[in-house]
Amino acid sequence: MTEVFNMGEYSMYIWPAWGFAVLVLGGLVIASVRVMQARERELAELEAAKPRRRRQKNPEGKSA
Amino acid sequence: MLQKYANPKRFLTLANSVLPWTTCATVILIVAGLYFAFAASPPDYQQGQTVRIMYVHVPSAWMAMFAYAFIVVASAVGLIWKHPVAHVGALAAAPIGACFTLICLATGSLWGKPMWGTWWVWDARLTSVLILFFLYLGFIALANAFDDSSRGEKASAILALIGGINLPIIKFSVDWWNTLHQPASVSKIDMPSIHSSMLTPLLLMGIGFTALFVTLVIIRVRAELASRRINALRAAKIHAEVAGG
Amino acid sequence: MTAFFALIKRDIRIALRQLSDTLIVIVFFVISASLFPFGVGAEPNLLARMAPGVLWVTALLSAMLSFDRLFQNDFEDGTLELLVIAPQPLWLSALAKIAAHWITTGFPVLLVAPLIGIMLNLKPEGLAVLLAAMALGTSIISLIGALGAALTLGSRRSGVLLSLLILPLAVPVLIFGSGAVEASIGGYPVSQQLLMLSGLLLACLVLCPWGCAAALRIANE
């Protein structure tokens, strides 16, 4: 196992290269998923609130 | 077929049924690719262990081009058939493509230091990728520059088409320029030609990155469609309040 | 076709009335080119070697200053809406505005370029090719720039955005333009570079007015 991680004199180029890739792609995945979850939660709340508003509106319509 | 998925709801049903599969494929392919890239492949006879940088560099370069091609096609579909989800797809793909391009540049530079002796060489391929990165930045900036999002997506779609036509010209001119101005002090180890022991990890990582790209596009499209729906609901709510009050 | 020339005439007349806009481009071109000797040193050989590249880069950058107003005034006062609904096809109107832009900024830059070339110790053999290549190059830059201006019309911070969009697309012009001048200084044939520039110009003549028209229509929706 140590052989795998020891890339000799080139370690200092190989690991930063892969580290950078993992960092950028990982950051992108986390950011995308978080934004999606936040938006969809917000949308669910809004859609859950919608029927109530309709019921409130109806009596007003009748009284007018 | 295309028209059917212009409806965001229908598109989401399809996308959500695909999403678990692409997620699984991404994880399996990339883990397998990593195993072959680090454990199950020998060092290259010429570049030694630095060949392992190639296993992330080359697939990123593929993805940088693939994502741009995806954006061009999606923009064309959006403009010609007025397909709303295609525009959203193009916008969702742009940051992903830009990230792959950035990874390609950074890993190319980290490969160049031990092989060429400098961090950056105005090599034809690196230079073309750098310009591709600028094109991505322009596309993203233009798409976000308008208060009206439909304006931004159409303008950036036209830019993507023009960029798509221009890209081969840029590539050709950079190659031509590079043959005239060969950097003289650089040792001439070219970017390697692929041979069989490299092929398995390269292909696994390449297909894994493609699956990651599809997964991320679906996730970002879902986020964008949700936020558009939120805006529409909010606008309707304000409208109702104004009308009611 | 009368509408085409009328539009060119109108734009030139407006440019003459606002002469400072054109002058700023020329002055920026001269100033930025004359900064290079301060930056890299005034050694004649070095300057002569750098002259083609410096001339092309500064010409390209100074042109960036002129595009944000290309459609802006017409967009604000409603002229653009008339052009969109006019019987003349919109791409032709866009081409007329691009031609007027070249006459009022590209052409003056072309005239000043040999002077700056001499200041930068550019060899006299290169001057004729410089003029020919710049005539083609500035036209291409006008075409691409107009496209950028049409795309960014009405956006936030359109000036900066415009440069970000146009400069990468203008890389081939820069390569073949300065390549032609360098080749002529070195005594090599320049036909290849000039033919490439002509080809680029033809491609842009087809693509850019069409793209401009599409972008202007979107801006007017």
Image (cartoon, coloured by chain):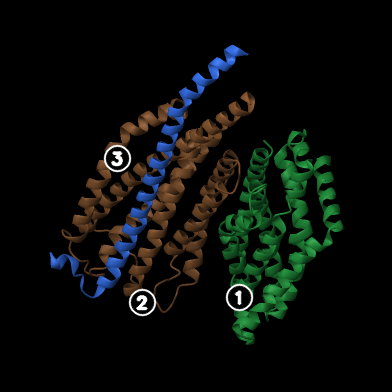
Chain colours: A blue, B brown, C green
Disc assigned to residue B22: 3
Residue C37 image point, x, y percent: 65, 82
Say which of marks 3 and 1 sits in front. Answer: 3
Q: Secondary structure at mark 3?
A: helix
Q: Residue furthest left?
A: A1
The residue that mark 2 highlights is: B117
Residue at 28% from the left image edge and 48% from the top image edge:
B208
Q: Secondary structure at mark 2?
A: loop
Quarter of the image for residue C17 reads: bottom right
Residue at 45% from the left image edge and 50% from the top image edge:
B95
Quarter of the image for residue B112 reads: bottom left
Few, some or many C-alpha atoms within 10 Å of disc 1 (few <14, some 14-19, many ≥20)?
few
Q: Quadrant of the N terminus of chain A?
A: bottom left
Amino acid at dot 1 = Gly
The residue that mark 1 highlights is: C187
Residue C90 image point, x, y percent: 72, 39
